[in-house]
Every structure is written in C-alpha cells, then in structure tokens.
Amino acid sequence: MKTLVTYFSQTGQTRKVADAIFEQLPGDKEIKPFDQVENLDGYGLTFIGFPIIAFGPAPPAKDFLAAKANGKQVALFITHAAPESDERVGEWLDRCREAASQSELIGLFDCMGELSEQIADYLLKSDDPMMRSYGERRQDTVGQPDSTRLKQAGEFAKETIDKVKG
C-alpha cells in the first residue's frame, strides 16, 4: 500500500508532526505539502495535516479535503495552540471531522503547536477577552510540539497503518 503524508504548515510546526508520522511509516511512502499534490489517486492511505485557524480547519485544509479527499481513506493530524485538554479543542476537532465527512476517516491525531508571535500580537489587541487570553498563552506554546508529542504522532502513524492493514 502506498501512503502519502501531506500537510499545510504556516510556521513549520505541523511539518514537524508530518515528519514524525512519515518516519514511522513502512513501505512505499511520500511526503508533500498540499500545493504539490494533484490528487490522491494511487494512495491507499493519506495522512492530512494542518493547523486550527479561527476555531476550525485552516482554509487550505478545508479546500484540500473538499477537492481531493472525497471517498479516500484519510487520517488527520492537527496542531492547535491550546493544551489537548482544553474543553474547546473538541469543538474544533469536530469541525475538522466535518470537513473530512466525504472521506473515510481512519483516525485523527491532535497536539499543541506553537502560536506564532504575529497571531498572538493580533489576539492581544482583540476586544474579546477570550481572544486576548489565547494571545497571553503564547509563551506556553513555544517549543511545541515537543519530543513527547512528536513521539505520540509516530505512534498514531503505526496504529493507523495497523488499523488499515486489519
């Protein structure tokens, strides 16, 4: 089975997760950013990664899923600037599942990534206290995903492959 790992990464953090997943995949495999993928034909499984932007999948991810992933076996890997235990993360992931609803979703992995300084500055200027609180937590995200989270991403890759092979 040929496997593709594809991703959209603004700051390089989602790319780190893509690399961790790719390293653990056996056999025939490729890794490419979204803009280098014409279609998913020929792949038995595609790992699709992207950050959460505005409480849902990044717009390029929504477009990619709608245009290229219909009817395909996919596993999502998602980064966000919140602890995995944050109660709002579940809602964000539900929006990602919804974006992939025309695909056969095999699995989903999420982890904290680093909030960019530019976005944190933008959030800190917001009139919304919740947005400002996200901006204030930037320092907690610096260096994420860490080695533990990257190892978990690799484990997710192995488990997903085992699930597909049945």
Image (cartoon, helix red, strand yellow):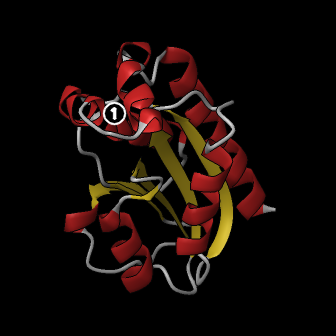
Which residue occupies 46% across, 41% down? 79
In the rendered view of the protein, which quadrant contains the N terminus?
bottom right
Helix or strand or loop: what does disc 1 sit on?
Answer: helix
Query: In this view of the protein, which residue sits in the foreground, 37 or 80?
Result: 80
- Quarter of the image for residue 123 reads top left
Answer with left or right where residue 56 lies relative to residue 152.
Answer: left
Residue 84 visible (yes or no): yes
Picture coordinates of residue 5, whole percent (x, y) = 42, 55
Picture coordinates of residue 16, whole percent (x, y) = 36, 33
Q: Is residue 126 above or below residue 28?
A: above
Q: Is residue 163 above or below residue 41?
A: above
Answer with left or right where residue 35 lies relative to residue 56.
Answer: left
Residue 157 visible (yes or no): no
Which residue occupies 68% across, 57% down? 107
- Quarter of the image for residue 127 reads top left
Answer with left or right where residue 19 lies relative to residue 100.
Answer: left
Query: In this view of the protein, which residue sits in the foreground, 26 or 102?
Result: 102
Residue placed furthest toward the front: 127
Residue placed furthest toward the right: 166
Q: Is residue 39 above or below residue 94?
A: below
In the rendered view of the protein, which quadrant contains the C terminus?
bottom right
Residue located beneath label 1 in the image: 13
Which residue occupies 56% across, 80% down? 72
Which amino acid type corresponds to the residue marked 1 in the rendered image? Gln
